[in-house]
Amino acid sequence: MASIFVVSAERFIPLFPRLACQGVLLGCHPCFRLNMFSKGTKRKFSDGDEEISDESLVGARVASSYSLQRQSLLDMSLIKLQLCHMLVEPNLCRSVLIANTVRQIQEEMTHDGSWHMVAEAFCSAGQSPSERLVATEVLCRSREQDAEPKLFSVISYEGCREEEVVADETLCSVSVSDTVSNVCLAGRIGQCWEKSELSGVERDEEALEDSRLGSGEDEEIDTKDRASTESPKTIGQVFGTFEIKNGSPGPDSALEELFSDVDTSYYDLDTMLTGMQSAPKMGPYDILDSLAPSHSSPSIVSTPNCRSDLNELDHIMEIIVGS
Amino acid sequence: MCAADSNSLELCYNGLSLSFRMADIISTVEFNYSGELLATGDKGGRVVIFQREQESKNRLLSRGEYNVYSTFQSHEPEFDYLKSLEIEEKINKIRWLPQQNAAHFLLSANDKTIKLWKISERDKRAEGYNLKDEDGRLRDPFRITTLRVPVLMPMDLMVEASPRRIFANAHTYHINSISVNSDYETYISADDLRINLWHLEITDRSFNIVDIKPANMEELTEVITAAECHPHQCNVFVYSSSKGTIRLCDMRAAALCDRHSKFFEEPEDPSSRSFFSEIISSISDVKFSHSGRYMMTRDYLSVKVWDLNMENRPVETYQVHEYLRSKLCSLYENDCIFDKFECCWNGSDSAIMTGSYNNFFRMFDRNTRRDITLEASRENSKPRAMLKPRKVCTGGKRKKDEISVDSLDFNKKILHTAWHPKENVIAVAATNNLYIFQDKIN
């Protein structure tokens, strides 16, 4: 089958089996084998020969490298879930396996607090962590700001384009508590989210010292890595396409501000299907476009598979509708 | 396979090979019960049947070769108007029915529809009709002065394939398996979430015997990946899942076999747990042994043989390409980790075979525990040439003739293989090439 997402070789970060407990994360010896499959060389862990006096620093580096790689796997999985061949039904087994992998990563991130960090950036100080629901849906739609946000997923298990698309359907969800909270996919928002996350990290210094070390470094490595390999926006867009939004309408003007410029009309079924989106808006297929290294701005450019399929789809819809 | 003792597979494989280039990617390969016929299905919905030549008494040194016997279009692409989705014409599975008369019957399935095809030979033609003349024009009855009896005259052999039954509209999800029951009257078809039981004569209804679809599709975490009927007990079948489990069900227990009679699962090794553990444990194929006492499952990295009487672990495990374990992330990225490899038994259940990448396929002798890696490629398989065993270098210095893991071609995958039910003849499908290897007579 044709792989239709563009991932440059430099972006690929190999993974190693997950480390079982916190103790191992902090005290492990940096001697694992990391094989670069595509390049055919063995990449040794760079700090292997250095004498490291500060063990916690080593541990933190290992931890951040691990979370970086875990994040990369999460990104990859989400892209795979989003990209489905529009004309033929996607392979259900593959979708289920990828979704389970995503769920696994999210559970782990929830347990070691990385997801927690993400959620905290958006919530008002009064709320305790346990009240925040960490739910992940691939796509969600919010019609009105004050109403209960409705969720829908373009990628449902029933096939890419079903009538159920407009109904509430989540691909995968990890619920930590009862509070409804939605994760939305929106490229532009992601950038705002990223900025606010960084500031959020700086603000909560005392409270989150240990984990912040990991995630702070995370951010640094993140941006450095991204800048060196491709346009910094792209990974941020994918990663940053997750935003945690409180479902219950609260007096949170900061959040309102963030989302005020979101145009939700492009989540309408029709506009998606006909692929008619104006330049600054990000739809599901634009993420695919923006991943190509040559892009610097999110413009609509046809990718061979999705766009021609959409045109065909357009044609078919016309026949069916009889217009 | 220069076996002096036919019970143990001597793994020095002498190949007498044939290869065919097909018009499209081969998606299934299956010998019939006698081994005389070999059917292949491809991505374009075509079925090509090969027939073995009768052994010539003059040429003692050569076994019968396989030649094309019949080609027909089994399935056409369809469009599901309700979902606005295409239905691929790719043949997912072919299963032969045991031969009961001069004609041959097989079932072929694409994602949604199963068809029963009758393949029959015609080598005679009736000539000398009274009411029509030789080119078919009707004769004027008043002109007929004498009556004659039509005579059967020989003609060139014609092989006709005609669809006798079409079993449609019973599967919402993609069909991954079909299996003919030992009663030769019924068969099962399995898709991602359901298994249906059909009668070969009845096309307008089927019984749903397994349904694992959750009420809320968001809760879906496991799908059916393969199913097979027991070779002797017509009430027993098994199905495998994407979580690496196999359930054996008895149709006598209940009409709906959602509750299994036996549950086979190997406990996970906690030290090798990773984010990919579940994906690589997903079973891509399950096959009963001919004896009916064992079954074999194929997951991404290994083949396991299970004793039906022992549910908690397999009795034998064979590593197919363990060197890929460190490459799982790349294989996930390029989707190769989702490849569904099949596996097969030899006629005596003493050996098993499965495919790998780089056009390699592996054979394991269960008695001697020896294994061999062979390659199906045009360069290496000249007719009547011996197949050279291949080796993958996993680390350190690469020896001559070895191939390193990073040089493997992951686009050349052997997913479908078949073993003759009685002899040491194997069919290996490599993308759009079919290789048939036979052992040489010493």
Image (spheres, rainbow, N blue to C red):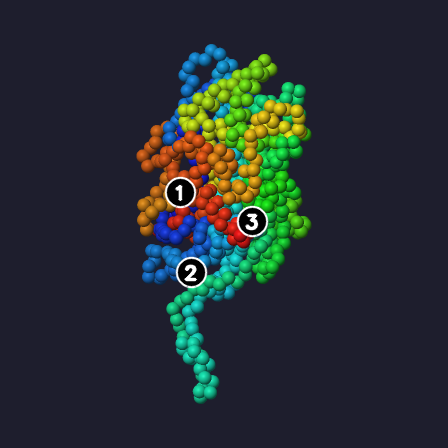
Above or below, B56 relative to A6: below
Q: Please give the name of the residue rendered at 40% of the width and 32% of the height, measured from the top-left corner.
A: A294
Nearest-to-viewer mark from 1 and 3:
3
The label shown at residue B83 is 3
Both marks 1 and 2 on one chain: yes
Marks 1 & 2, CB-CB < 8 Å contact: no
- The residue labelled by disc 2 is B70
Residue B295 appears at what percent x and percent y?
54, 45
Q: Check disc 3 and give the amino acid type.
A: Lys
The foreground one among B163 and A258 is A258
Marks 1 & 3, CB-CB < 8 Å contact: no
Neighbor class of circle 3 (other Cα within 10 Å; few <14, some 14-19, many 20+) is some
Q: Check disc 2 and give the amino acid type.
A: Ser
Task: Choose the circle earlier in sequence order: 1 or 3.
Answer: 3
- Chain where mark 1 sits: B
Q: Please give the name of the residue rendered at 58% of the width and 39% of the height, measured from the top-left corner.
A: A153
Q: Please give the name of the residue rendered at 58% of the width and 61% of the height, measured from the top-left corner.
A: B201
